Image (cartoon, coloured by chain):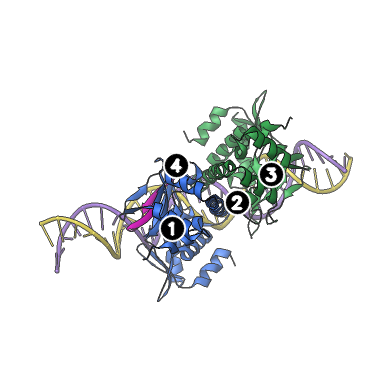
Chain colours: A blue, B green, C yellow, D purple
Amino acid sequence: MSAGPHLLDHAPLFEGLEPDALAAIERAARVRSVDRGACFFHQGDPAEALHVLVSGAVKMTQVDAAGHQVVPRVIKRGDMFGCAPVLSRSVYPATADALVDSYAWIWDCATLQRLFDAHPALARNALRVVGARLNELQDRLLEVASIRVEQRLARTLLRLVRQAGKRVDEGVAIDMPLSRQDLAELCGTTLFSVSRTLSRWESEGLVIIGRHRVTIVDRHGVVTIAEDL
Amino acid sequence: MSAGPHLLDHAPLFEGLEPDALAAIERAARVRSVDRGACFFHQGDPAEALHVLVSGAVKMTQVDAAGHQVVPRVIKRGDMFGCAPVLSRSVYPATADALVDSYAWIWDCATLQRLFDAHPALARNALRVVGARLNELQDRLLEVASIRVEQRLARTLLRLVRQAGKRVDEGVAIDMPLSRQDLAELCGTTLFSVSRTLSRWESEGLVIIGRHRVTIVDRHGVVTIAEDL
DNA sequence: CGTGGCCTTGAACACTATCAACAACTGTGG
DNA sequence: CCACAGTTGTTGATAGTGTTCAAGGCCACG
């Protein structure tokens, strides 16, 4: 669980910076740890800091006036979250709940401002990162708007595996305790549909399911569904 | 249809810049006009320039491998589009079709680079702009994932009116020739559902519909539907 | 005018949400 | 170690929403 400059260097925001810049950035970081079930910040809180997850897992959730929820994304080691300060936004647009005990580096607004001024390359990186996120969101919009639940769920699982896959004996497990409800909110459907679909897939030998746990056994089979082949 | 510095000053990317900076930016712009039905660029084309629409109307569309389409947004006078170069993306993620004869200012990558270097405030603006776009997309994701077609359509119309509303005798018209199909792709449904819903609303006196045209008569009524009151 | 594109409407059907009841598991405290 | 409460997950029945397909009308433009 080393959290040296390697982690920072791999965080896209800090990619390709000079070693001394990275060192300065690391020195400027503060740390914050949050127990399972607690949260780093709530939707609507004033945006105070940029976060990079060092260990653990975090679920972002967004809720509308009527109480409907979505999970725009989940966060693993090395991922940035709480980017609002970088984007000059005054409040966090989503809530960040720790799925397991988690530990993050954070930089408050003032510090961030200073770093941006001192290292102009940061701004370029920030734009790249945000651009990527934008693309990701556009893809999900296209997905939710135009394909069926089963296919969406398959794609969601593949995304999760890519992001947080862990090799185990039976295949690749998603190394994050996600409930059926969480999965449903990740792919824009109900927990019932998720439960049903996963049960069927398990009986077909595509996956193994457990409480807060999904393991992909036949990845190719899941890809076939995701791509509608 | 003056297109002086005022337009640039109102484009969020150039907001708050010094007058001489604005003048330099304007001098660096090239122009491009595109006839109705033609397009500025296609999804997948190499990202060559940032655009700001000076006159006309543009529809962005994104298509997936299976041919499903969505319209992430429409563009009116003063709006930026084709931001890919700003985000260091190599290709445009969507197609920009002119709904009517349109005219835009454009800045190619090299020029943009030069402007960014010369005017550091541009980078901050760019991040703000992209942050806003990100929020907008997250909202739409929440919307598509969790609310019904009728309500989505109401919200879509209200958004369009806010962006491109034109006062007319009967109410507020959407000043842009959008087909039922376009509307469907804007709110993630089918042209049939849009047609049906609009017909019903017309019979209830909420809107007046025409070919490529929607006029909101009872805005409050539409808001009622949009907010599910 | 005639042709093609756009729009409307009806009917059937597929999908998925909703609801209810229950089963399985986790963690807690006796 | 067991009992219990609370949470999480499963499954069936049902109904509603929205898509799909087909047929026809309307409008704009050449």
Give the numbered dot on residue B87.
2
**Location of mark 1 (residue):** A23
* Distance Cα–Cα, label 3 vs label 1: 38 Å
**Residue B178 x/y as whole percent:** 69, 40
The residue lying toward the viewer, choosing from B215 and B200, is B215
Query: Which image quadrant is residue A27 in?
Result: bottom left
* Mark 4 and mark 2 residues within 8 Å of each other at the beta carbon: no
Within-10-Å neighbours for mark 3: few <14, some 14–19, many 20+:
many
In this image, B203 relative to A118: left or right? right
Where residue A81 appears, as percent x and y from the top left, is 44, 52
Q: Chain of mark 4?
A: A
Q: Chain of mark 2?
A: B
Marks 3 and 4 belong to one chain:
no
Which disc number belongs to residue B159?
Answer: none
Instruction: Provide the secondary structure element on which disc 1 rests.
Output: helix
Q: Residues within 10 Å of mark 4 (few under 14, many from 20)?
A: few
On residue B51, which mark appears?
3
Specify start and end residues of the magenta stretch as a single range: A94-105
Mark 4 or mark 1, which is nearer to you?
Answer: 1
For the residues beneath circles 4 and 1, the answer to whether they share a chain is yes
Q: Position of residue B194 (x, y in %)?
A: 62, 42
Q: Is residue A172 above or below residue A189?
A: below
In three-dimensional space, the C-alpha distance between marks 2 and 3, rounded to whole angstroms, equals 13 Å
